Amino acid sequence: MKSEKPEAFYKKLKIQLEETSKWPSNYLYKFIVPTSTEKINQINTVFDNIGAVIESRESKTGKYTSISIAVRLKNPDAVIEKYIKVGKIEGVISL
């Protein structure tokens, strides 16, 4: 995502999601974040109360944590909305 502007990335993502999935649909987010309880909690808060299944795993060195979030969303806009919210958390890398 670094090579293109976020607006272009999200526009392209929306088109891909519309073409490849029937909505509502399950979506899997993957993030890498510096291991910090505060940052992990901030990500978890974005997905609170929507039935998300969240798994996290620390790297071997403990420096980073990978977070996988499986959730059923109503449309591509809902997927992008979550990416935008998580993107505001410093240090988070979206995969």
Image (cartoon, rainbow, N blue to C red):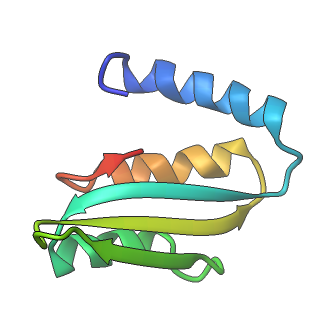
Residue 39 on image: x %, y %? 22, 70
> Hey, which quadrant is residue 67 in on the image?
bottom left
Q: Quadrant of the C terminus?
A: top left
User: Closer to the camera, 33 or 62?
Assistant: 62
Residue 40 on image: x %, y %? 28, 74
Image side of residue 77 versus residue 56, left or right: right
Most distant residue in the front direction: 60
> Hey, which quadrant is residue 17 in on the image?
top right
Residue at position x 76%, y 49% in the image:
75
Residue at position x 30%, y 25% in the image:
2
Q: How many marks?
A: 0
Residue at position x 50%, y 77% in the image:
54
Image side of residue 45 versus residue 69, left or right: left
**For residue 44, above or below residue 32:** below
Residue at position x 25%, y 56% in the image:
89
**For residue 73, above or below residue 5:** below
> Hey, which quadrant is residue 46 in on the image?
bottom left
Q: Quadrant of the N terminus?
A: top left
Most distant residue in the right direction: 22
